[in-house]
Amino acid sequence: MTECEDYLEFFLDYCASECGLSNNTIHAYRTDIIRFLEHMQFKASSDLENLSVTDIVNYVDAARRRGLSPNSVWRSVVSIRMFFRFLKLEGYVENDATELFGTPRLWRKIPEVLSEKQVEELLNAPDEAKPFEARDKAILEVLYATGARASEICGLNVGSVNEKYGFIRCFGKRRKERLIPIGRSALKALRHYEMKVRPQLACLQTEDALFLTKSGRRIDRSLVWRVVKKYSVRIGFGNEIYPHMLRHSFATHLLSGGADLRAIQMMLGHSDISTTEIYSHVDRGRLEAHHAKFHPRA
């Protein structure tokens, strides 16, 4: 391995052990930084030391010419800045040119959402009389009822659900714990799955995972993705629906119903309210209604 590759491994170990970043984030950092190092043909610490702002600008221009989206380009710049910040902190380099290179605030993409009727069709698509479709229905119900991410659904354990008080306990990014209320419909689907299906799948390998595969193992994100796609196609929606769309729909429908933005922020596990505010742009009808009701010259 080259000296730069060694530094990259040190950085990724730091991200995992000290920062507690997810595997997905670490994988993204690895991909971005390797692409940068290969483009720059950096091998040794002296190469890193001599990096200039012009080099970074040229790299960004080259990435754009390759067809990378603006979001992908700027995400890679953030990865590179994190890498160099670590190198300087640990004393591997003295100069960090990335400090002089700003990352502009990107336009946020308006999230795609389903209507309440579309969600209802999707949740009713599985046939609970069939064991694996009963499991799938429970997955879909929990996705929409809580706004949880697919990875958080996969991480749920049997003890994560408190049926008496009506909430689930899940761990989001950086293992941040939160409690999310869960409605009667989702609890009913969960109860049916846990009583009728899960005991048939459970084995010693599962520990206490809530949702299980046919082989009795904890489900992964790819299975959640396939579940959503399967029933999306079944009801004629095609392949356009994905798990995160249910999270977007959860937040938008709560906002439409009058929920407080701060409460939605807590349920989604957003650390910054600005991330949650994107849903106020989605619910245009509610904004227009408020304007018509309260503006003196509406």
Image: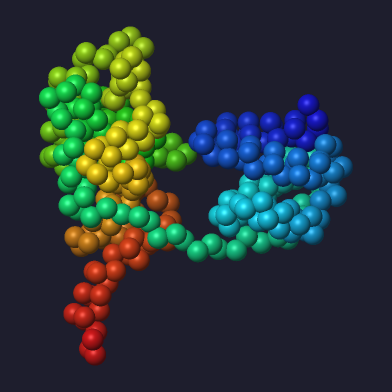
* Image coordinates for residue 169, horizontal then vertical, percent: 29, 35
- Which corner quadrant holds the N terminus? top right
Question: Would residue 191 be seen by someone viewing this image from the given angle?
Answer: no
Taking depth in this image into account, of 27 and 243 the one nearest to the observer is: 243
* Image coordinates for residue 208, horizontal then vertical, percent: 31, 19
Quadrant in the picture for residue 205 = top left
Q: Is residue 195 above or below residue 41?
A: above
Q: How many marks?
A: 0
- Which corner quadrant holds the C terminus? bottom left
* Image coordinates for residue 224, horizontal then vertical, percent: 34, 33
Quadrant in the picture for residue 150 = top left
* Image coordinates for residue 69, horizontal then vertical, percent: 57, 54
Q: In this image, 40 relative to 292: left or right?
A: right
Residue shown at 12% from the left, 24% from the top: 129
Residue shown at 33% from the left, 9% from the top: 204
Residue shown at 57% from the left, 35% from the top: 27
Q: Is residue 229 above or below residue 100?
A: above
**Color style of the picture:** rainbow
Q: In this image, 29 relative to 95: left or right?
A: left
Taking depth in this image into account, of 157 and 226 the one nearest to the observer is: 226
Q: In this image, 24 relative to 169: left or right?
A: right
